[in-house]
Image: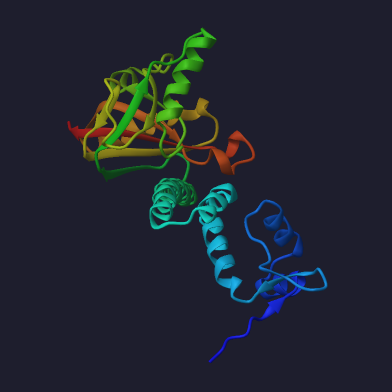
């Protein structure tokens, strides 16, 4: 059976595909996609069969392929050329998926932290089982602003899940009540992260304490944690790690929740 072409004006073809006429005019202008027929009246018409071509263009565009790349491919179409475009875009998609998975992980962790903030009371202390945790550490920044910026920059680049900086202090200083100088800053890192400054907190029993309010009140939380350890015949070991849980969800420091985690062993 003979097939007769179905010719459509720019407006009709645009409406058929949910596009504005300006888009089709632009595609025509840059040599990407043009009407296939010119009538005796001088008007140009799209053939309905061009729907397939436009569909391919829109698919590639939605996948992030630049219009200039699509045009180059359409000027010299071949299996090899398409495979080259597809391979390049698949690599980009893999990278984007990696970023999306990372963003999802960040949001999940932020949600878990905020749920924890709603659950706990200021001064609450509990004994918990923790998996191994990996931290990238750095010395506390001094008065040198350039050194401080360099230290914080290194930590920020390694902070894969953007949990923010924490600080840590030795259990010996906690026992002495010496909070004047902390041992350093940290950010959590994956187990695969390699650095001479990586600190491994082994899996095991930990005291976990929470404080709501300004950091000036943290010594009172440590007093409660020491009291808890004495009553339960435990001793603090290693380092106490402090991390803010809700920086992005508070109006002022009176709502700030700090979590302090420190390993314990039988006394």
Quadrant of residue 34 within the rendered picture:
bottom right
Extreme-left residue of the structure: 266
The C terminus lies in quadrant: top left
Task: Tell me which residue sits at (45%, 48%) in the image.
Answer: 96
Image position of 68 with respect to 24: above or below = above
User: Residue 18 location in percent, x, y?
Assistant: 68, 70
User: Residue 228 location in percent, x, y?
Assistant: 31, 37
Residue 161 lies left or right of residue 55; in this view the side is left
Extreme-bottom residue of the structure: 1
Extreme-front residue of the structure: 40
Image position of 145 with respect to 109: above or below = above
User: Residue 5 location in percent, x, y?
Assistant: 64, 81
Quadrant of residue 99 within the rendered picture:
top left
Q: Nearer the viewer, residue 119 or 160?
A: 160
Task: Tell me which residue sits at (49%, 51%) in the image.
Answer: 118
Task: Tell me which residue sits at (56%, 56%) in the image.
Answer: 61
Task: Tell me which residue sits at (56%, 61%) in the image.
Answer: 57
Image position of 90 with respect to 175: above or below = below
Q: Nearer the viewer, residue 84 or 37?
A: 37
Residue 226 lies left or right of residue 151; in this view the side is left
Q: Nearer the viewer, residue 209 or 60?
A: 60
Image position of 263 with respect to 63: above or below = above
Q: How is the image coloured?
A: rainbow
Instruction: Say how many tags the image has.
Output: 0
Residue 248 lies left or right of residue 39; in this view the side is left
User: Residue 219 location in percent, x, y?
Assistant: 43, 26
Extreme-right residue of the structure: 41
Residue 56 lies left or right of residue 83; in this view the side is right
């Amino acid at each position: 059976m003979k097939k007769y072409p179905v010719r459509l004006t720019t407006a009709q073809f645009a409406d058929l595909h949910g596009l504005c006429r300006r888009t089709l005019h632009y595609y025509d202008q840059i040599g990407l996609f043009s009407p296939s027929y010119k009538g005796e009246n001088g008007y140009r018409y799209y053939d309905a069969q061009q729907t397939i071509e436009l569909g391919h263009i829109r698919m590639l565009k939605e996948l992030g392929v630049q219009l200039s790349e699509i045009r180059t491919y359409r000027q010299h179409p071949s299996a090899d050329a398409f495979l080259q475009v597809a391979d390049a875009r698949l690599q980009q998609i893999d990278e984007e998926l990696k970023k999306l998975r990372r963003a999802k992980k960040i949001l999940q962790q932020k949600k878990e932290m905020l749920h924890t903030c709603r659950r706990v009371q200021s001064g609450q202390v509990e004994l918990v089982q923790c998996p191994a945790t990996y931290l990238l550490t750095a010395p506390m920044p001094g008065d040198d602003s350039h050194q401080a910026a360099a230290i914080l920059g290194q930590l920020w680049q390694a902070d894969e899940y953007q949990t923010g900086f924490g600080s840590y202090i030795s259990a010996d200083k906690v026992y002495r009540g010496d909070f004047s100088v902390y041992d350093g800053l940290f950010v959590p890192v994956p187990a695969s992260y390699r650095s001479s400054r990586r600190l491994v907190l082994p899996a095991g029993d930990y005291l976990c304490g929470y404080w709501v309010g300004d950091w000036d009140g943290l010594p009172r939380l440590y007093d409660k944690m020491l009291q808890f350890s004495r009553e339960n015949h435990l001793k603090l070991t290693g380092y106490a790690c402090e991390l803010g849980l809700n920086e992005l969800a508070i109006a002022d420091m009176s709502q700030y929740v700090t979590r302090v985690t420190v390993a314990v062993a039988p006394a």
